[in-house]
C-alpha cells in the first residue's frame, strides 16, 4: 500500500519495528489485566520501555507506567497514551481463538486487548522509541490503569503533575481516522424513601415504590429536555436499574434506588446533572404524602489500584471535543493521510468514551485519537487487530507525533 507524502511529512522518514511491536503486543495479551489487576502487564511494559532505551522509566502511585523519549531541544511535549487494563473476557468457550492466546491468523492478531488496547499500546510505544534523536520536544509514553472503569489512572496522572503534555494522542481505535472527541458518561442514583412495614399491614408503612412512577416521569422530563451537539449528537438520559431495600417479598420497602445512565456533552458537571434531576423531582413529587422523601446523588464506586491507591469515585467520565479546524487537528490529519486515497485523514468523533475526557475535557490539553482497529470488535469475544492496518498506522505514527508536536509548539 503506497502512502502519499505531504509537505509536513516529506522530510521525516522513520520506520518503527513492526515485528518487535507485534511480539510485544502478543506478550501483553497473554497477561490478563482487569481493572485493579494490571500489575503483571505494567511490569512487562516497564521492561520494554527499558529495553527500547526510554528515559525516566517509572511507575507512579496509581500504577501507571511512564517513559520518555527525550527531545533534542525545546519543542512541545507530546503524550502517547493507551491503557493497561482490559474488560473481562467472559466464557472462553465462546471465543473463536483463546482470549489470552494472542493467536495470529487470517491476517489478524486475536485475543482480549488485541485492539482495545494492547496492540495499539505496543505500536505507540515502538513508534515513540523510533523517534529518538529526531524531534525537538519530548515524547512521553504513559499507559494508565482503570480506563475501563472511568479513568482513575489518567485522572491521577494529570492531577499529580507527573506529566505535563502540550498535546495528547490516545490509542483507542479510530480505524486510521483522526478522532477529536466523544460524549461523556455519568451514573446517577435517585433514592426514594418511605417507611418499612409488614406487607400484611400496608396502612402502617410508606411504600417507597409508590414514588417510583413519578420519579420515572421526572427522569423522562429531564431526558426530553436534553441538548444536542451537531457533531457528537444528543445528550441522552435513561433509567437502567431499580433496587429496593429491604429485599424480602413480605416487607414493604422503605428505600428504592433508581439507577440512571447519562451520556453527557462536554463541559457538563456533576452539579448540573444532580441539579436537573432534583428540580424535576421537586416538580413531580411536590404533592407527595407525608412520610416520603427523596434525594439525588452521583453513583460511586470504591476502586483500589494494584499499587494500593484507594479512591471512592463518582462515576463520571467527562466528554470532550476539539474543534475540527484546530491547527493541531489539521496538521495531524495531513500527516496521517489515508490508507486508500489521497488527502488528509477523515476527522470525526468517537462513539465511545476515552481518557481524552480527562486530558482535554477537564485539563484543556488538546487531545485526539489515531489508531488501528474497528470499534465493532471492541469488548467482544471476536476482538482482533488487522495487521495490515496496524502496520500502516505504525508507519504513520512518527509523522503524526511530529506534526502534533510542531503544531502545539
Ligand atoms: Zn480502550
Image (spheres, helix red, strand yellow):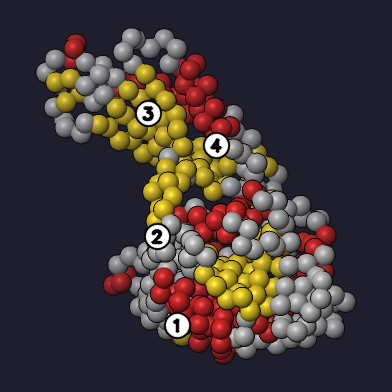
Report the residue at 29% width, 19% height from top: 194
Q: How far is the residue under mark 2 from the one under mark 3?
A: 31 Å
- Which is more N-terminal, label 1 or label 3? 1
- Which is more N-terminal, label 3 or label 4? 3
Is label 4 in contact with label 3 (beta carbons under 8 Å)? no
Report the residue at 68% width, 61% height from top: 164
Q: Which mark is residue 270?
A: 4
Classify mark 4 as within 8 Å of ligand 1 or not, answering yes or no: no
The residue that label 1 is drawn on is: 27
Q: Which mark is residue 4?
A: none
Q: Nearer the viewer, mark 2 or mark 4?
A: 2
Q: How far is the residue under mark 3 from the one under mark 1?
A: 46 Å
**Residue closer to the observer: 397 or 379:** 397
Q: How far is the residue under mark 2 from the one under mark 4?
A: 27 Å
The residue that label 3 is drawn on is: 191
In the figure, is residue 139 to the left or right of 86? right
- Which is more N-terminal, label 4 or label 2? 4
Q: How far is the residue under mark 2 from the one under mark 1?
A: 25 Å
The residue that label 2 is drawn on is: 308
| Residue 31 in the image, given as x and y percentages of width and height | 39, 76
Q: How far is the residue under mark 4 from the one under mark 3?
A: 16 Å
Q: Is residue 121 above or below residue 298?
A: below
Report the residue at 21% width, 21% height from top: 196
Q: How far is the residue under mark 4 from the one under mark 1?
A: 40 Å
Q: Quadrant of residue 143?
A: bottom right
Quadrant in which the C terminus is drawn: bottom right
Q: Residues within 10 Å of mark 1 (few under 14, many from 20)?
A: some
Q: Is residue 51 above or below residue 155?
A: below
Of all residues, the one furthest to the left in this rendering is 200
Q: Residues within 10 Å of mark 3 (few under 14, many from 20)?
A: many
Of all residues, the one furthest to the right in this rendering is 7
Report the residue at 73% width, 67% height from top: 77
Amino acid at each position: 500500500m503506497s502512502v502519499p507524502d505531504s509537505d509536513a511529512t516529506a522530510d521525516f522518514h522513520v520506520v518503527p519495528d513492526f515485528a518487535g511491536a507485534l511480539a510485544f503486543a502478543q506478550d501483553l495479551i497473554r497477561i490478563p489485566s482487569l481493572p485493579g489487576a494490571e500489575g503483571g502487564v505494567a511490569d512487562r511494559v516497564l521492561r520494554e520501555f527499558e529495553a527500547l532505551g526510554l528515559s525516566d522509566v517509572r511507575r507512579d502511585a496509581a500504577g501507571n507506567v511512564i517513559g520518555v523519549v527525550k527531545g533534542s531541544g525545546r519543542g512541545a511535549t507530546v503524550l502517547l497514551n493507551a491503557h493497561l487494563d482490559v474488560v473481562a473476557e467472559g466464557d472462553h468457550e465462546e471465543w473463536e481463538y483463546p482470549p489470552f492466546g494472542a493467536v495470529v491468523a487470517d491476517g489478524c492478531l486475536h485475543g482480549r486487548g488485541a485492539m482495545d488496547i494492547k496492540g495499539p499500546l505496543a505500536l505507540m510505544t515502538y513508534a515513540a522509541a523510533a523517534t529518538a534523536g529526531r524531534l525537538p520536544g519530548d515524547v512521553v509514553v504513559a499507559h494508565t490503569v482503570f480506563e475501563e472503569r472511568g479513568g482513575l489512572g489518567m485522572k491521577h496522572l494529570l492531577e499529580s503533575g507527573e506529566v505535563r503534555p502540550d498535546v495528547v494522542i490516545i490509542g483507542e481505535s479510530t480505524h486510521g481516522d483522526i478522532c477529536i472527541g466523544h460524549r461523556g458518561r455519568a451514573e446517577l442514583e435517585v433514592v426514594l424513601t418511605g417507611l418499612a412495614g409488614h406487607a400484611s399491614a400496608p396502612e402502617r408503612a410508606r411504600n417507597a415504590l409508590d414514588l417510583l412512577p413519578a420519579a420515572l416521569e421526572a427522569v423522562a422530563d429531564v431526558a426530553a429536555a436534553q441538548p444536542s451537539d451537531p457533531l457528537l449528537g444528543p445528550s441522552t438520559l435513561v433509567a437502567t436499574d431499580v433496587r429496593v431495600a429491604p429485599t424480602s417479598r413480605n416487607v414493604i420497602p422503605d428505600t428504592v434506588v433508581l439507577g440512571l445512565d447519562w451520556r453527557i456533552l462536554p463541559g457538563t458537571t456533576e452539579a448540573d446533572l444532580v441539579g436537573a434531576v432534583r428540580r424535576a423531582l421537586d416538580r413531580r413529587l411536590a404533592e407527595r404524602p407525608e412520610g416520603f422523601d427523596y434525594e439525588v446523588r452521583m453513583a460511586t464506586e470504591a476502586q483500589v489500584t494494584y499499587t494500593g491507591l484507594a479512591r471512592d469515585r463518582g462515576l463520571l467520565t467527562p466528554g470532550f471535543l476539539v474543534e475540527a479546524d484546530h491547527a493541531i487537528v489539521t496538521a495531524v490529519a495531513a500527516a496521517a493521510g489515508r490508507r486508500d486515497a489521497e488527502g488528509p485523514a477523515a476527522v470525526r468523533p468517537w462513539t465511545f468514551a476515552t481518557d481524552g475526557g480527562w486530558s482535554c475535557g477537564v485539563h484543556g490539553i488538546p487531545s485526539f485519537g489515531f489508531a488501528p482497529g474497528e470499534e465493532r470488535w471492541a469488548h467482544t469475544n471476536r476482538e482482533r487487530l488487522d495487521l495490515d492496518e496496524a502496520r500502516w498506522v505504525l508507519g504513520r505514527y512518527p509523522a503524526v507525533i511530529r506534526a502534533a508536536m510542531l503544531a502545539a509548539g
